[in-house]
Image: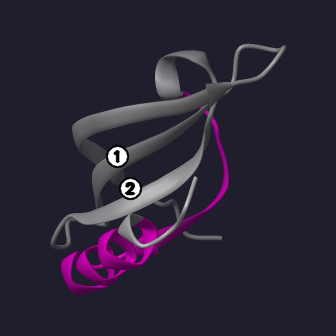
Amino acid sequence: MAEIKYEIKEQIAVLSEGAKGWTKELNLISWNDREPKYDIREWAPEHEKMGKGVTISKDEMVALKEAVSKLEL
């Protein structure tokens, strides 16, 4: 299995923290030296391990932001 290379370009927000210290975060990440994308996933302390997540483009983030702004929370 090929190694996945990633670089967190910007840590935007910690959305929550679990009992074992893992945090769900919104970050801007470059995967395999590609253009950075927005990413939501769980991370172990020090970012040495990660859980499954979702990666979205800038256009998708704009659409998500518009959708979230319409929610009545």
Q: Position of residue 11 (x, y in %)?
A: 29, 34
- Asked if residue 51 lies in the magenta stretch, the reply is yes
Q: Is residue 40 left or right of residue 37?
A: right
**Dot 2 and dot 1 residues touching (CB under 8 Å):** no
**For residue 73, above or below residue 50:** below
The residue that label 1 is drawn on is: 27
Task: Report the amino acid beneath label 1.
Answer: Asn
Q: Earlier in the sequence, mark 2 or mark 1?
A: 2
Q: Quadrant of residue 49?
A: top right
Residue lying at 22% horizontally and 85% vertically, measured from the top left: 59
For residue 61, above or below residue 42: below
Residue 58 point in image, percent of width and height: 20, 76
Range drawn in magenta: 48-68
Which numbered disc covers residue 5? 2
Horizontal side, residue 19 vs residue 3: left or right:
right
Is 65 rendered above or below residue 22? below
Amino acid found under the numbered disc labelled 2: Lys
Which residue appears farthest toward the right when viewing the image? 19
Q: Residue at x 82, y 15 (%)?
A: 20
The label nearer to you, 2 versus 1, is 1
Where's residue 46, x and y in %? 50, 17
Front in this rendered view, residue 11 or 61: 61
User: Rounded to the nearest whole Å, what is the CA distance between mark 2 and mark 1?
Assistant: 15 Å
